[in-house]
Structures are given as C-alpha cells and as structure tokens.
C-alpha cells in the first residue's frame, strides 16, 4: 500500500503533506457553512458532546472536515471513514488528521481512514477501523448509507450464529462481490474476537443516519425487530431532504457531468430515472442548462408532479435510443440495464446520482459478450459494444457527483450537517428520550437549522404579530406547520 | 329578489335559462376531469353513496357541477351552496338544477342555492338552506373553508347556551360584519327551532374538508374537544394540496390578474406573501410571465425554499414602494394593511388568492381618511388616497381567481374532487372506521387519484420488477412512499 | 345595421354610451403606456403633427385609443378603422369618438369605424371610410398588417386597368372569400370615382407599418417596383419586434387561451408552429405554465434555437395525435390543415396567434365531409368530425389574443406605439429624407423608445465613463450597437 | 524553459507524451462536433484549402484540435498559437503536434506554439512563431480576439515608421504591461528584419475573426482606413454569436465557477455586468441554478430585455454589498473596479467571461494599499483587504471559463468552428469577391451551419410546400429571413 502513511490504529490517509491545501479549503468552506459555525459559537462553551465517541462514516470531503471539527469543538472524540471508495478528497482527509493546530510531522487532529480510490477490501477495513477504538469503544455512530450500522448489525448477527454464512455464489441471483468482501471482513473479526461486535453494539447510544437508503435499511431492521439501538433519521428533516437531496443535486450533477465529459448539455435529451427530491433537483439542473428532460417513474404521484412540471414521463425503454444522458436517482437496482445500454445512442452518457452502484447494472455490462472497456480518464470509462457503439459510464456506476466532482457544495452540506450535529447532541444528551426505533427530529429543530442559514443568503424574515399568530393558532416563534406538512 | 327563480326550499339560482350554456360547459369540463369520470364508470354500478344525503358547500362552478353529478351518479342526494359570495358561475348553477335530463321548465337535477354576487345575508341563508332537507336531514357534509361545518357547530353551541352571544361591537378588535350576519342567522334559527342544529349534527356521519383553512378550523375544534363528527382532511392528500393549491394557482392567478387588469406582468415586481403551496404556484406563474418575484415569509424553512428557488425574500414593508403586484397566499389576516396600501406605487394591484378576505385589511382601507373607491368594472375597484395615488383591489379582497376569473381549471379540480368523492365514499361506507377527529386519506387512495389522471396527460408509468420491489421492501402495486414523505 | 350609431361619414361604432367605461380604461392604460405619455409631454408643445391627416388601421383597442389621442395631442387629425373583424373593443371605440372632453351627445373625439364582430363586407367598408376624408384627403397611413396600404395599391391598380379583375372562382386554388369582398369594394369605388385612389395615393407622404406580415407585403411591392410611397417598417425596431411580438405574445397567448377555454395548460403538450419572436414568446408562456412545448420550424437556425432552449422540434404530423394545444405563429398559410385536425386528440385546442386566419385551414375544415360546428361561446367553436372527436377552434382561426382576449397589454403596446408615433413624426416632418422604399428607424430612435420605458420598470441604467466609451469607440449617449446587432 | 519540448521553429508544447490522452479526447470531441465532421466528409475530396497556409490563433483546446485537423483535412497547412496565456489544454496541443498518425517520437501533425500558463513574453513569442513560416509565408489568418491581426498591423506600422514608439510609461493612463511586451517583440523583429511584417501582410488574403472584441478592432481599423486585407466577421453569424456566445457561456460559466470555487450558486445573488449574448447566457445559467440575477447595463434596449426576462437591473454600486458573484460580460474595461471590490461582501467571487482581463481592474486591485494575495489553487486567488474581508478572483481576471475550466463544450465550438472553416474556404477560394473591409457570411451559409447540426440533436425540420413558400415569397430551400432579422 505504498504511498500511504502507515499508521495502523491511528489513521490512514494518502499524504499528510496535502494538509496545508486541505486547510485552506476548509477555511473557505467554513464561510459557506454558516449553520455549523453558528453551532460552534453557541454550543462550544457548554461542550455538550464531551464524552461522546463517534464512529463516523460519511464521504471524507472538505465539508465533512468542517463537520468533524464542529463535533470535536463540541467535545466529541471521533474516528472517521468514507462511505464510498471514490469520494474521499485526500487533502481534506490529511487536514483533519493534522488538525488546525498540528503539523504533518506532529498531527493533532482526528483519526481518519480514507483515501480516493480504495479497493473494496480496503473500504471494509477502514469501516472496521472506525470502530476499533483505543480504550472504551464508540458510543455513537454517524452514518451515511448505513454501511457502518450494517457492519455492527451483521457482526452481532455473525457472533450470535457463531459463524458467517457463505452468502450466494457468483452467478447466483443476488450475489454481490461486495457482500463477499464484507463477509470476509466479519470472518476475520470473528476469528480474532467472537464477541467484539456484540460488545461494541452494547455501547452504542444510537446512530444518526444521513440518507434515504440508510433510513430504509434502518426501517427494515426496525420492522424485523433487529434494530440494536435508537436511530435518528436526519434525512427526513426538511432542511436535509429538500435541500441536500434537491438543491445539492441541482448543483453537483452539472459539476459531475461537466468535469467528467465536457459535453454540451443544452439541446440534448436527458433521461432522469426517478422524480423524488434527487430526481427533481437533477431535472431542474438539466432543464436550466437547456436540456429536454424525460422522467421515468414508478410512483403515480411523482409521475404526475413530473408531467405538471412540464417533463415528458416515459419508460427508459421508450426513449433509450434518443436520450443523450441517463441519470439514475432512484435508490433501486437495475434501473439502467445492460440491455438498455446495448440499445443506446453512440456515446450516450450514463451516470448514477441516486445511491448505490447497482442502479446501473455494471455487472451485466461487464458480462456482455464482446464488450470492451477503456478508461478515458479516472472515473470515466468508455464501454464499447460489439456493434461499435459505446456508452460513457461515470464513476463505474457509483455516485457521479462524488466520483467525478467534489460532491455537494459546502452550503448545502451545512444544512445537512447542522441537522447531523443537532441530532448527535440530542441523541447523546437525551438518550433516554429515544427508544430503540427510527426517529425524526422535531420540527422546531428543523426550523432552527433553516434559521441558522438565512442571514448568509440575505433573507429578511417576516415576524407574525400576536394577533396574526392567534388567528392561526400558532406560537409567534413557531413551529409554523403541522408535522405532516409537505413543503 | 327580482331576477331570481323563487323556489324556496327547492333551489335558488339566477336564471334557469342559462342551463343550456352551463350544460355545454359541463360537457367540456367532463373531458378535463378524467378522475371523476373514471369513478363514475367504476363505481356507479354499485351505488356506494345510495342513502347519502350530502350538504355541499363549495364554489358553485362548472367543475363543481361535475362533482355534484358524480356524487349523484354514485347514488347520493345533495343540496348545494357556494362557499363564496362571488364565486358562483350562474350557468353552472342553473345546469345542475336542470340536470342532464331536465329542462328549465321541468328541472330534474339537484337543489342549488347560489348565485354570483350574494350579499352576506344571502350567503348565510344559502348555507342554511343546504341543511334544510325535506324529510330526513343530511348525513354528510362536503365543505370548503369550513363555513358549513362552522354553521352546524355554532348552531349546536347556541342551542346548548340557549342564546346567541352578542359578539363584538363595531370598532372593537376582532369585530367582523360577517360574524354579526352569521349570529343573526343563528338567532332566527334558534327562535324557530331551539334544537334544529343539535338534531342535524346528530345525523352527520362526517365531513370532508377541502382547504387548509377549513382543516385548521377542524383541528382547532378537535383540540378543543368540540368537534362533533369525524372529518377527513382532503386538503392533505398530495394529489389535492400539491396539485390544487400549487398547479391550480399557477394557472388561475394569471387568469384572474389578466381578466381583472389587462396589465403586463412581465418586467414588473410582484410581492407574493407566503411561500406555501399556493405561494409556490403563484411565484412560478409570475416568474413564468417574466415578473421578478419577492416573497415574504414567516417560516424559515419556506423562506429558505424561496431563496433557493431564486426569489428575493423580504418583508412587505421592505418593497412596498417598488412592487407592482401584491398577492397574498397566507391564510392569515392583515398581511397587506391599509398602511401598506397607503405607501404603494400609484396603481399597484392588490389581490388575495389565499383564503379569506381579511388577508388584505379591507376594513382598514375603507376607514382610511379621505380614501375614495370607484368600480373600474365588477370586482375591480380603484381606491384613491388623498395624496392622489390609487391602488387597484381585486374582488374586494376575496379570492381573485374565483372573483375575477373562473377559478381553477377543470383538470386541477378533477384531482381535488376525485379525492373528495373517494373520501365521501370511504367515510359514508366505513363510518365506523373513523372516530371523531381529523383524518387523512391513506396513501394508497392518494396514489389511486394520481393514477386516474395519468392517461389523460400521456404519462407512461414504469412498473417495478418483483426483484426491484423486494430490494426496496415495497409491494409492486404501492404505496411507494412512507407516510411522512414530502414529495 | 341596428344597434349601431348611424353617422355615415362621421363615425360608426357600436354604442356611444360605452364611452364612459372606455374612458376609465383609457385612463388606466395611460399609466401603463409611459412612452406615449412621455412623448405627449415632450412634443405636444411643438405640435409636430400639425397638418398630418392620418388614415389609421390598427385593432381598435383601449391601447390604440391612447395612441390615437397621442397623435392628436401632437397635432394630427385621424380617421380610424380596425384591422381585424373581431378585435375592436367597443368601449374604446366609443371613448375615442366621444373624446376626453366630449359627451355621447356631443362627441368631440376622432372618427372611428370599427366594432367587434364585423362582417367582411363591413370590414372593407370601414377600411374605405378611413380614406374618405372630408376636404383634403389623408396624407399619412398608419397600418397593421397592410390592409389599408393594400386597399390604396389595389385601388390604384384597378384605376390604371380601368377594371377590377374577376379574381379566382370558388374552388380554384388561391381563391379567398375575402379577396372577392375586397374586389367588390373596389368595383363600387371604381364605378363611383375612377380616379379616387389615384388621387389619394398621390397625397400620401408615407406609411408606417406595424407587423411582419405587413412589412413582407411592402417588401414585395418594393421589389416589384409597385410601391407608391415611402414606408417605415416599425416592426423591425428592436423595441417593437422583440417586445410586442415576444413579450406581448407571452402575455396575451395565455389570456386568450384561458378566457376561451379555461383548460389547464400545465402538464399538457403544446405544439407551437414557428419559433420566430412570436413563437418564442408563445413557447415561453406555455412552458411557464408547465406545459411541454414541441416546436415545428422550417428555418434551421430557429430550429436550432428551439432545441437549445430545451424544446423538442418536430413536424406537426409527428405529434398531431399527442398534442393538446396547437398554436400557429408563422405568418404562413396551411400550417394546420384539415387533415391535421382530423387526426388530433379529442377536444384539442387549435388557435392562431401569427397573423392571418389562413394559418389554420378553416376553409378545408368547413369543407370536411360530415363535420359539424357548434358555438361553445363567442369566438370558440367545437368542430366535430364524423368519427366523434372534436377540436376547439378559437376566433375562427383569426388572432386568438385579440378575438378571445383583449390583445397585448398596454405596456407592450406602449413600446410598439411609441415607435409608431416617432416614425409618423419622422416621416411627416422629414418626408424628403425618405425615398420610395421600405425603411427602418435609426437605432438612436429605437434606443430612445427603450429609454422612455425604463423608469416605469424600476431600471437603473449604468452610464459609460468617457474612458470606457473611448475604449469601445462609442459615444457615451449611444447608439451602443452596430446596426446588424441581433440582441 | 525546462519541461518543454525544445523544437524552435517547429513547435513548442508542454509534453508530447500527453498526446495519447489528447487523442482520446479529440476522438470524443469529434462525436460532438458534427458540423466539422460533415465538412470533412463533404469537402475533403475536393481539397479546397490546398495551398492555404493558415496562421491560427485560438485557444489551443481539444475542440481547436478538431478544427485544425479539419482545416488540414481540407488541404491547408497551419501553424497555431493560443490567444490566451491560460487557455491551452496541453494534451490537445501535444496531440495536434503528434497528429493522428504520428508518435511522440515521430510527430507528424501540425506545429503548435502553446502551453497552459505562458508568460506575456512567451505569449507574444508564440504569436510571432505562427507567422514564421518556413519558405513562403502564411496567406490566411484565423484569429480570436484579434491579437494575431494586431501583431501584423502593428508590425507593418512599426516598419513604416522605422521604429517602435515608446508607448506609455508605468503609471500613465492607458499604460499596460502587455503593450510593452508587444512593443518589445516588435523591436526585436524590426532589428532582425525591417520589412518582415510588411512582406507577411502583403501575402495575406484575409482573416476570419472569431469574437466581438476582435471584430470591433477590425471595424476600427477599417474605419481608420488602416485595414490591410479583407476580414470575415465570423462572430456575426447567428450560428456563432447566438450559439457560442450565449449557449456556450450558459454551459461553461457554471463549469468555471464550480471547478474554481465549489461554492453553491443557488440562493445566492449574482451580478452579471452586461446583457448581450454572453450576459444572457450567463444570466440564464445562474438562474437555472437558483441564483437571483441582477444585471447592469448601459444600453437601454438590453436593459429592457433584462427586466422583461425577470431580472433586476441596477448599477454595480447599487448591489455591490449584497451580491455573492460578480460576472463581467461586457468587453469593456473597468467594469469591476478596485473600489467595488473593496466594498464587496467577504469572499465574494469575481470573474470575467467577457473578453480581456481589464474588465476587472486587476492593476487597481494589486495597487490597493495593504491588499494581500494568496493562491487558493491555480487560477483562484484570494485577495484580502486591510479590513479583513477578501474577494476570490478567478483566472486573474482573464476568461474564467477557459482559465478555470475547459472552455465551451465541443458542440458549441462545432457551430462556431464550422463557420470558421466555411469562412476560410470562402475567403481563400473566392478572395476576389472580398474587398478590404469587414464582411459577414451570407445567410445561406449561416443556415447551412445550422442544418449541419440538427440531426445530432434529433431535430426534425418542417419543409415548406411550394404554395407556402410562394405565399411568403421565399425559396423552399431558404434563406428564410431578411438579413436584418434578429432571431
């Protein structure tokens, strides 16, 4: 693993000399993360996270660095991994390790285990490392997509069973290479310490989860009665789901497409699979560039929204031969199949901005008889079919805004991460208020996150008079909407 | 009351000879209301509303005519009033009375009590009439804004107290002329039959309510423990609130402004007060015409949405001297005050598309020393201040899309009214399933409403494979989203 | 001709008692026509149009009333007709006749010959009347579409030939009923005075023409060497073509569609035939309402613009079965044929906002075997084909924004009419500077028109420093662009 | 000059080993440049540019590589420099030198003199090199911004005068460091060969110029009677100015901002200075991302367009303290002054996408007392004022889409460069048809460029019938518009 600082048990990043550049970017990002900086100002004096040991797993970007340093400013200890093998910004990882007061020679920041371009084996080793705490184990998880939580739950399950099942074999339905790597990681752990995960799980007060996909997994665990600790669904805060998912994607989709391909978007046809918040942001971005958007949807309500917003709604197969871009935003698998790709126009661009890499059937593509793959540049591959036409697949089917660009801009991550910090504080300091289950943040906290971001955007809020508030049956200070309000 | 058919106890509309024109419009509207027509085809054979006696109070438009005739096609008897003194389309009212098979000489339709331009006294008399059933009283209410429900509740309260309180006097805070008219109506009823409303209320299985404002009133009644029967909050169906409130307003705001003023919207500055669904639709419509929109908001989340959508967010007083249009969408009172209007540009246009006429302080305007009022044309008044500048107030502060135009287009009302019919059927046929409280329609029914409207818009829906559905933990047929999903 | 004031030789409008309402609308319109009002303030003192006798032919609307009264304020005498049989607003016509200082009993305004709903015979009689001047004939023409100019030229041609040719017979290619009416008018004139038009033409200093279509006719006359006097192509001023054609249509298309049909536009598919300025405005308006726009084009440059703006570009026949609206903007004939209409969806809406009624093949439609026509309301007809499907044709194929609504809003007409007044003044006072041919206004005057409209829109213009102006080789005061600049 | 291939007289690029990567990008770009590829297919057989020796000066990007190889495919010899010190893509330069059939060891392509990050001295040396032809000199110039043309004209002038004037001294008004470098280059040339430029100029058949700025210089030369050879203003083709300037900027502005800053654009305020085609594209892009755009303008017509498109129009100083982005698009100098920057919000982003680096007063900024400058990353500098606030200046004030990103996407450059090739062919093969002056391409050729790009965008063009064409007085094959039509 040449080229990496070898500091087993302490940190694993690409190169600490990148820290200076990372620090400069962090300083600029802080300016764009007014919610986190306000929380530091407000809460650091009272150190509400003193005693918290947070196992963190979110894309290790510059913005995450500001999150990490906000958590530590509030008293927490953290260990961090990325939740995606391509998404780490190596300068950010180095800067967090070095810390604002350290030097590459004497790092004084937080342990990070992440670099751009991990193998699957490395990925799960890093995930394992954030739970490998010197002394007392972690007592909080901050997760994105649910891999850290999954690791704990599968570890506990394996330890209960005393063994790690064989999984499916290559070629069987549902088989994934990644599942096999995870199982192998667990087998090693089981061999080393047959009660390790059971002990870790016992110490966890709860998890705060960032994404739709991760929350779906938590809901499934909760429904199955297998959830081991309370969870806060940060994704369901309006200031997270409507902002990060929609406005973040609106920004970073174009950034990813542009850095990857430099291809004109205007005048082209773009298929957006899914019209949830991510799909809405993607469609808005593409239309804003002059593309014609076609949406595919399974949900009649979202389909009706798409058509009322002026987009054609069709199935992928209806437009497969005329679209220039295919963008998946569904969180489901097999949305773009190898058959679809075989039928596309020459040099169609295929990218995923939903969650996992199985939205695009990469395995099916690789298995297509006679297909060839050439790396145009890192994270951009041209797959050529035997008939001569090729498709350009971004980030090997993983999140293109992270793999081909730098993810969401800082401001968007500020709304999202301000929710995370507030959720960590609430869950850590009021753990008794949360039973084992999946919870959402109360609306008052959600509105608070919004309020912390208005000044930076020049917003001048109207204040209800007492008479007006009474007329509506509201408190002047909010919350202003019923819980089921949809915004 | 010359000019009206005098048929006390049977119907009261302007002129039955308008029925032919109304019928023609109804036939065209049916084409644009695919959800209602599909329900007729599906449900008429089983007559699920046989035995239902529905007291209805919704703007008596052509679209409501299609709703009424759908309810009767499903077996219901109805009596109908408008919920707004200006909103009746006289041809529609006449056509409903005449019915598809009747003639003006031999009307065979449903009783309607509504005409364009009622006085407040007439309005509450009409509301009273829809409860004055020959034989058995009504057993269902279909309401818009909650006036029909209010009448029953205030009637019962008066009968419990044995008297109608004096209300406030003119000049006192909170005094409204309309409240006085309502109290007078109740006094007459109390004198005539001191148990009339108590009896009516006992017979009601429930109410389905159309609007945010009406639901807020129901919630207040429920919280106070005063609600007398179950209520279904139709407004909270996604296919109602996101469609009627947003897309309907997007359409009918422009229609109202154009018919009222013929003033160019492009290039002008428009203040939209409130950025809920109605405000979002209004802002989209105005921007789509090339106006620059400034939003005022009390809710930091909605304010953040507005600014992220590219609108300036300011207080009314910040832009009162530079905006050309002032559109209220809040559901609150005193949003545009007389002081605001005194400070506006010459010939600024002021209109309300929220709910009640107190969003604009009409009383304060009328009381402004030296102000004069000239009717430019019906529902458009120029109020001139002593300094010589004037403002154009639409529909005397009531809903401008109804007063100055013909309300929402049929297609939008189809999504809304399909929810109403489904709610009426569910509440009438499964009354036991609903306790006294405020309920929302299950998501499966909401998705069904959407599905009934897709074909007409050329939408081709994608269907989940079994593998995909399992991956998401969903049924192939839906529902596709958790209840708290915000769309 | 009951119902009309019978004042042969003086005026012919529907009812002078409408004048009061018209005057009120004129006063409001003046507020929205800052360019014309500024010209009155600037130029009335010097009476530059004293001695001008203007034969005017533009849609006789409230805005035209402000134009007429601006021309008279500058010293001109005028006589006026409408250039479209449906477009007259009767109140405006009456108010112009009565004048600001007259009464219905003692009208003191200008002679007008126009009412809503003229027959073709009446239309050409009215056109004839504006040339029938008591005493000296007209010396200026202000034209829209070129009918007034056509009348003079065909009159002269007939007088040269000594006869009016037979034209084509019904059934022959190129035959039009209107042509026959025009020829009949000329025959009468020829019988009465065989040198009348020759004399009139001799007295005309020139014409200012409003529209693309009219200019095309002028260009054809000029190319053929038949043009009889100088012409200024007002339509080519940027402040006319880009404003009136684009922003005016953006506004009034929706107004026309809404008043005519009340049909939801959002979510629907709209075919816009042509992507010139009118088509661009139409497409923007429809998209702003949430429709999906498909553009048809013959010009590869405009087609490329349409696709770069995100619209699908296809032929009418490619989408004839899926579009809900068909809007013609081309200025050409047979754009929507009877075959197209026979293949449309049930209740498709067909309207023209280009120029003449032959964009839609009304004659072919009427001749379709078994087709029936029902008037839904004035200017809205449902044509039902033998297979049962129907199409809704607006304004019988004539301009729908004029026939179904009130035309462009005042502000747009202000930019357009300010060009007209400036052109009339320049042509009348500097007639020697214009040879017989088609001219455009110099850019400095075009920029002046723009400047006269900025204050009303709150625009704060930047001023070049002398250094900056020198750097660009410009004068600080403009003009700022080369003549071929396209904006 | 370590790190560069030293091949004086042959080529000067950074590293020929980059050629393979460049070739891959060229192959992808060819797919996005359908106009150029169509010209190769059509014209290569007849070799219309055989004998042409083209001195080329356009940003040396991948797209320019496709242009160069199209010119050579048509028979031309070329020598190439970049017209901007930051805009060269080193892989593209290397690939052109190596050529499609060569190797880094045996390059067989065309001579290129360009690399990313030239000094001013190097820049003018490279410009000089493209005129230093072995054997016969160049006979054609292909220019962007006019520097190559300027060099010839100033060279000739110096040779006429026998000396190079002293220019202005540092500190004097109008002094530029670049001017001094250019004069030094000319002094060396004059010393070496006092008739060199005179001879070169004599051999030039003409120049085709790409940009507004370059054309303005040509117009000034022509007006002054100093123009030495015919020029074709490629910029004025609709398919150039409306596409490259508008749609190209719409795409590449976001790309530049994102790569440079990763700052959220949505919800922010962006000042766009100038509302010509470039400004229109910039405003559309920023709005499409959810920013609120404020436009500054000197031209009342463009200002009126901006406000009608829904943008606030104000002066820079009116919003200097509230905007987050300042984008110059004017082609003028001192648009953003040091005083402006001193008054901006902390971390405001300042970038130029107009033409020269003097739109932003970089010299004034550098001279501000106490200001400091830190390189955040290449082409992104944080300038901190003594009061602590800083501004982020992109590409040192030069074109940010080229300096911070990769310039316009290939498709846009295809419309632009197809015009260039057609212009080179026309000027070279029909030189007699062009007198010494500034010419525009005939509309038929402009329409041809559009036509060559429609298929790739799925456009299906409508064809006029003969009857329709006659009605309009057009040829079925076009051109379809008069020369002054503005699109």
Image (spheres, coloured by chain):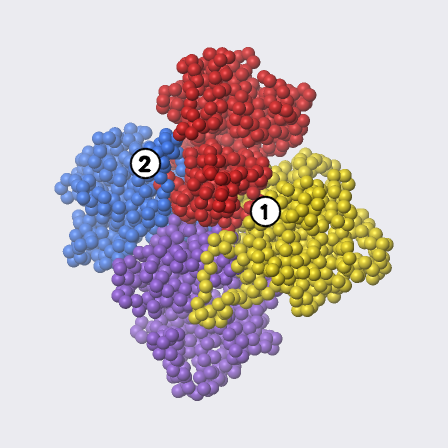
Chain colours: A red, B blue, C purple, D yellow
- Give x and y (percent) for residue D275: 59, 53
- Seen in the picture, residue D439 relative to A254 is either above or below; the reply is below
- Give x and y (percent) for residue C90: 38, 67
Mark 2 — on which chain does it sit?
A: B
Viewed as shown, does residue B76 lie left or right of B168?
Answer: left
- Residue tagged 1: D27
Res. C91 image quadrant = bottom left
Name the foreground residue: B169 vs A275: A275
Q: Which mark is residue B192?
A: none
How far separated are the C-alphas under marks 1 and 2? 46 Å
Residue at the spot 67% in from the left edge and 23% down from the top edge: A104
**Callout 1: SS:** helix
- Seen in the picture, residue A170 relative to C411 is either above or below; the reply is above
**Callout 2: SS:** loop
- Is the same chain shared between marks 1 and 2? no
Residue at the spot 47% in from the left edge and 35% down from the top edge: A367
Q: Are marks 1 and 2 in contact (CB under 8 Å)?
A: no
Residue at the spot 45% in from the left edge and 43% down from the top edge: A342
- Seen in the picture, residue D101 relative to A420 is either above or below; the reply is below
Res. B281 image quadrant = top left
Q: Residues within 10 Å of mark 2 (few under 14, many from 20)?
A: few
- Give x and y (percent) for residue A68: 56, 25
Mark 1 — on which chain does it sit?
A: D
Q: Nearer the viewer, mark 1 or mark 2?
A: 1
Q: Quadrant of the N terminus of chain D?
A: top right
Residue at the spot 66% in from the left edge and 39% down from the top edge: D380
- Residue tagged 2: B477
Viewed as shown, does residue D379 lie left or right of A162?
Answer: right
Name the foreground residue: A268 vs A482: A268
Can you see residue D474? yes
């Amino acid at each position: 693993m040449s080229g990496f600082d070898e500091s087993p048990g302490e940190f694993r990043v690409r190169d600490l000399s990148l820290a200076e550049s990372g620090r400069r970017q962090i300083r600029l990002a802080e300016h764009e993360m007014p919610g986190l900086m306000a929380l530091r100002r407000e809460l650091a004096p009272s150190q509400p996270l003193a005693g918290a040991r947070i196992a963190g797993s979110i894309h290790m970007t510059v913005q995450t660095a500001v999150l990490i340093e906000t958590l530590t400013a509030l008293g927490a200890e953290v260990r961090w991994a990325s939740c995606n093998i391509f998404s780490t910004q190596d300068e950010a990882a180095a800067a967090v390790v070095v810390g604002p007061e350290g030097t590459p020679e004497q790092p004084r920041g937080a342990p990070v285990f992440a670099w751009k371009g991990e193998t699957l084996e490395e990925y799960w080793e890093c995930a394992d490392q954030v739970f490998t705490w010197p002394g007392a184990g972690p007592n909080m998880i901050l997760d994105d997509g649910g891999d850290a939580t999954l690791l704990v739950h599968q570890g506990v399950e394996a330890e209960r069973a005393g063994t790690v099942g064989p999984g499916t074999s290559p070629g069987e339905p549902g088989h994934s290479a990644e599942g096999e790597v995870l199982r192998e990681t667990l087998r090693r752990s089981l061999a080393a310490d047959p009660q390790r995960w059971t002990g870790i799980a016992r110490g966890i007060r709860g998890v705060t989860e960032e994404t739709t996909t991760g929350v779906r997994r938590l809901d499934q665990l909760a429904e199955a009665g297998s959830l081991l600790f309370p969870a806060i669904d940060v994704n369901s805060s309006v200031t997270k789901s409507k902002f990060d998912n929609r406005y973040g994607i609106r920004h970073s989709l174009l950034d990813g497409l542009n850095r990857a391909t430099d291809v004109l978007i205007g005048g082209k046809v773009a298929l957006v699979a899914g019209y949830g918040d991510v799909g809405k942001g993607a469609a808005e971005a593409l239309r804003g560039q002059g593309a014609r958007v076609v949406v595919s949807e399974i949900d009649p309500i979202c389909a009706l929204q798409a058509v009322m917003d002026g987009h054609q709604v069709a199935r992928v197969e209806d437009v497969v031969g005329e679209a220039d871009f295919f963008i998946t935003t569904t969180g489901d698998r097999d949305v773009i199949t190898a058959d679809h790709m075989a039928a596309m126009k020459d040099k169609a661009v295929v990218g995923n901005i939903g969650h996992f890499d199985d939205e695009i059937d990469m395995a099916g593509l690789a298995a297509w008889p006679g297909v060839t793959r050439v790396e145009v540049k890192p994270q951009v591959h041209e797959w050529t079919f035997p008939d001569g036409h090729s498709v350009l697949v971004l980030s090997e089917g993983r999140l293109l805004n992270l793999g081909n660009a730098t993810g969401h801009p800082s401001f968007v991550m500020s709304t999202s991460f301000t929710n995370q910090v507030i959720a960590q504080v609430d869950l850590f300091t009021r753990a008794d208020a949360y039973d084992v289950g999946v919870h959402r943040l109360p609306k008052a906290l959600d509105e608070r996150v919004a309020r912390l971001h208005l000044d930076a955007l020049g917003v001048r809020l109207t204040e209800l008079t007492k008479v007006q508030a009474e007329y509506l049956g509201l408190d002047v200070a909010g919350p202003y909407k019923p819980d089921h309000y949809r915004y």
